[in-house]
Amino acid sequence: MSQGKLKLLHEPESEDPILSVVNLIDIFLVIIAALLVTVAQNPMLNAFSKQDVTVIADPGKPSMEMIVKKGEKIEHYKASGSIGQGEGEKAGVAYRMKDGSIVYVPEDEAQQTNANNP
C-alpha cells in the first residue's frame, strides 16, 4: 500500500489533466483583464464615465456620422448628404494664422477693425 502512495507522488506533472484546465483558466483571466482595461480606456464604452464625448467618423464626407454621449444618453447622427439651409446672419470672421491656430472675430469687432483701417 505504501508503494501506491509513492507512485502518486512521483508521477510527472505533464500527465495531470488538472494542470491543463488551470492553464486555460489563466489564459481566460488574462483575456478578461485585457478587455476590462480596453473598456475602461474607451470613453464611449465606459458606463461609469461622467464625461461628455463626441466622436465624428469620416469627417467632411457624405458618409459622415457623429455619435454624442452626454452622461448616460447616447445620440447617433448621420449625414444626409444635402446642404444645410436656413435663416441667419453673419456672426463674424475666422482667420487661420501661420501657426495653424484659428482666430474668430465677432461681427461687431470686425466692422470696427475694418472702419479703423482704411
Image (tube, rainbow, N blue to C red):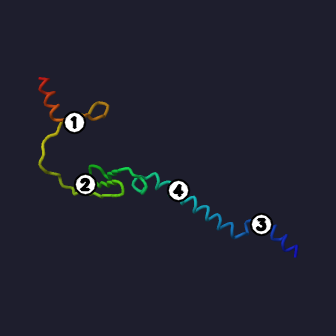
4 sits to left or right of 105 = right
Q: Are marks 1 and 4 in contact (CB under 8 Å)?
A: no
Q: Measured along the vertical axis of the image, is residue 89 above or below residue 4?
A: above
In the rendered view of the protein, which quadrant contains the N terminus? Answer: bottom right
Q: Residue flagged by tag 4: what amino acid is it?
A: Ala
Disc 3 crowd, CA 10 A, few/some/many (<14, 14-19, 20+): few
* Residue lying at 33% horizontally and 51% vertically, measured from the top left: 54
Rounded to the nearest angstrom, the CA distance separating label 1 from label 4 is: 44 Å
Q: Residue flagged by tag 2: what amino acid is it?
A: Pro
Marking on residue 38: none
Circle 1 residue: 94
Between discs 2 and 3, the one toward the N terminus:
3
Circle 3 residue: 12
Q: Residue flagged by tag 3: what amino acid is it?
A: Pro
Q: Are marks 2 and 3 in contact (CB under 8 Å)?
A: no
Horizontal and vertical percent position of residue 16: 72, 69
Horizontal and vertical percent position of residue 66: 30, 54
Q: Looking at the rendering, which quadrant does residue 117 occupy?
A: top left
Residue, far right: 2
Horizontal and vertical percent position of residue 12: 77, 66
Between discs 2 and 4, the one toward the N terminus:
4
Q: Tag 2, which secondary structure? A: loop
Circle 2 residue: 62
Q: Residue flagged by tag 1: what amino acid is it?
A: Ala
Between discs 1 and 2, the one toward the N terminus:
2
| Tag nearer the camera, 3 or 1 | 1
* Residue lying at 13% horizontally and 50% vertically, measured from the top left: 86
Marking on residue 34: 4
